[in-house]
Image (spheres, helix red, strand yellow):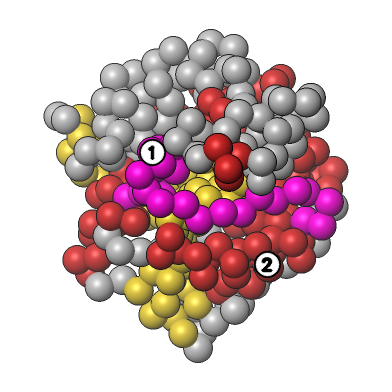
Amino acid sequence: MMELDNEQIESQLRLHVDRLAGLIGPRYLQKPKTITATIGYIEGQWAGMGYTSSRECYDALGDQATNIIVEQPGSKRSGEIILLGAHYDTVYSTPGADDNASAIAVLLEVGRLLREHQSNRTIRYVAFACEEPPYFNVDTMGSQHHARRSRLRGDKIRGMLCLEMVGYYSDVANSQKVPPLIPMWLRRFFPHRGNFLAAVGNMPSWKLCWRFRRGFKRGARSMPLFSICLPEKINEIRLSDNSSFWDQGYPALMLTDTSFLRNPNYHRATDTPDTLDYQRMTEVTLGVASALRFLAG
């Protein structure tokens, strides 16, 4: 991996979140200037790293939506893909520092760390449009569009990693809630302090979950990781772009600070850059980069 110290990574993460959530603010199609600025920012960052990005445009309820894609071709197994993705849009009511500028920031910095890495499998980075309502869980969701096109092309996606809100942490007792559909007997195994990153899969994604954990812990030894695979009837695990890939039969994980189960600023005007923990986001970046390198070979 490219040699960057923790202070450099943290500084870059702060910059990305400040530009997206501080300078641009709420990012949604009905406010097209914010989307244009966001796309320009992401493309500019990737170009500055030496990547060539492409756009995947489609109709979303009468507006043009744009996924932004970078591919780093593999060598021995280039037809197999490991995908790292995050959505860049917000609901109208929030500047979206955690949801989801934090994830775009980590997406960009993982790409920077792995820029010189030659992997066996192809690494695909995608910044998704239209994860939030009114597009969520319908055909106009950016990840739904990309996952369907990937299946139609016959893309061999061996694992999809979805970054979904990765910046909010708390060491306070009982700061972490448990999804209500988790059985009572199982709840004692769940953390009750919001100081960890969760890697959540559906049952068919168990092998990806196990391999992700191995890779993550190599790069982020001090960052607690709670990894688990659960039935999809527990609705909270389907609330981001990972579910689009499950729908197409691809293994996928949601990497998250658990959103509204922890962060009181979810979808509110108070989801601002100053509420995030950039030191822990740095650990997440190092862990995800290590896991992506491990998965890609």
- Label 1 is placed on what type of residue? Asn
Q: Which residues are magenta?
A: 220-244
Report which residue position mark 1 lands on. Answer: 235
Q: Which mark is residue 106?
A: none
In the image, residue 237 lies in the stretch drawn in magenta: yes
Disc on the earlier residue, 2 or 1:
2
Q: Quadrant of the N terminus?
A: bottom right
On screen, residue 134 versus residue 193, left or right, reads: left
In the image, residue 231 lies in the stretch drawn in magenta: yes
Q: Residue at x 66, y 30 (%)?
A: 176
Disc 2 versus disc 1: nearer the observer: 1
At mark 1, the secondary structure is helix
Q: Position of residue 39 (x, y in %)?
A: 43, 38
Q: Residue furthest bottom?
A: 76
Relative height, residue 211 to residue 20 (above, below): below
Identify the image quadrant of residue 4.
bottom right
Check disc 1: other Cα within 10 Å, few if <14, some if 14-19, many if 20+.
few
Q: Nearer the viewer, residue 161 or 186?
A: 186
Q: Is residue 240 visible?
A: no
Relative height, residue 91 to residue 45 (above, below): above
- Label 2 is placed on what type of residue? Gly
Report which residue position mark 2 lands on. Answer: 215
